[in-house]
Amino acid sequence: EEFEVRVGEEEGAWRPKPVPGVPPCAVRLACGPYHTLALLSAGKGGGRVWQWGDVSDTPQAPPHPVQGLERIVQVAATNDANAAIDADGCVLLWGGSLANLLLEAPPHVLGGVRRDPAPLRPLRGRAVRSISLGGSIATAVTADGEVWLWTLSSLASVAGTVRRRFIEWSRLELPGDAAAGAGGEEGGEADEPDEGPVLRPGRRVTLCGLQVRADLNGAVGRLQAFDSTSGRWAVALDGAASVRIKPINLTPVTPAAESGEASSSPQRCAVGLASACGSEHALVLCASLPSAR
């Protein structure tokens, strides 16, 4: 009730109630049923995260920063789990039982509260662009357009021991996704095997999700070198100068386009853009693009 909006002077008019104690530089919000996360702006390198409300085992907690989170670019929240993505595309989770399940915690700590954000190891090595959490489902979209799905099927306690059964993180096959097939079209070649990081020197990429330089979204170039100090790739754009871009804003061009293979009909590939989760279902926004793009 302390966070209820107040009624205006006119009947039926509602005015939002300011949340005291939150610095006035929030750029994104995420809400669970009874708590809120706020991502605060900190320039181009990402910001800090604040939370308030019924947080884990602390009811009606006042606004306070989440320790251990820096350079954050996106936040997500659900019943008893919170997620944040840093500027390198790493996902960090904290909260209650759902957060522990997503982190594949041992059974004896599933019911505990995780206050310190921990990295999502099942997706390590992949730069995640966005993540969404539901009551028993989660989705993640990587920088190269892959969509990953996690679904809880059952959770029971037998003789005091928690036993869990769930579908582990697995790649979701999108309609028209050539990479999800076994061998491509007749006479063609299958996609290259996973040889480590998707982004590597010499690979052609498309720029996406840029805010300050939105005019460069959709531009195509070739990766030159990665600067570990700034956390950015040097990209030589086609017909333009070189720019420095974060991995989360780079989508690799398909191998068929890189090799310049011709086809009697334009090949297309499905690319995930974003996702959203309800309690037990998910929506995925995707686009079917020419592979040469």
Image (tube, rainbow, N blue to C red):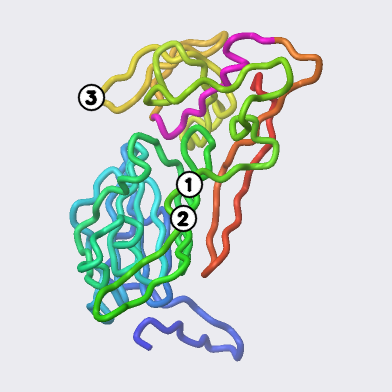
Amino acid, disc 1: Ser
Q: Nearer the viewer, residue 60 or 276?
A: 276
| Distance CA(mark 1)–CA(mark 2) | 7 Å
Please say if 20 is above or below 242: below
Amino acid at pointer 2: Trp
Residue named by callout 1: 170
Q: Name the N-terminal-most of marks 1 and 2.
A: 2
As measured in the structure, the alpha-carbon distance from the residue carrying label 3 to the one carrying label 2 is: 33 Å
Q: Is residue 229 magenta?
A: no
Circle 1 crowding by C-alpha within 10 Å: few under 14, some 14–19, many from 20: some
Q: Quadrant of residue 235?
A: top left
Q: Position of residue 21 (x, y in %)?
A: 26, 69
Residue designated by label 2: 150
Q: What's the amino acid at mark 3?
A: Thr
Q: Relative to 169, say whether 255 is above or below.
A: above
- 214 with respect to 19 (left or right): right
Q: Could you tell whether 241 is left or right of 123 in the image? A: right
The residues colored magenta run 247-261
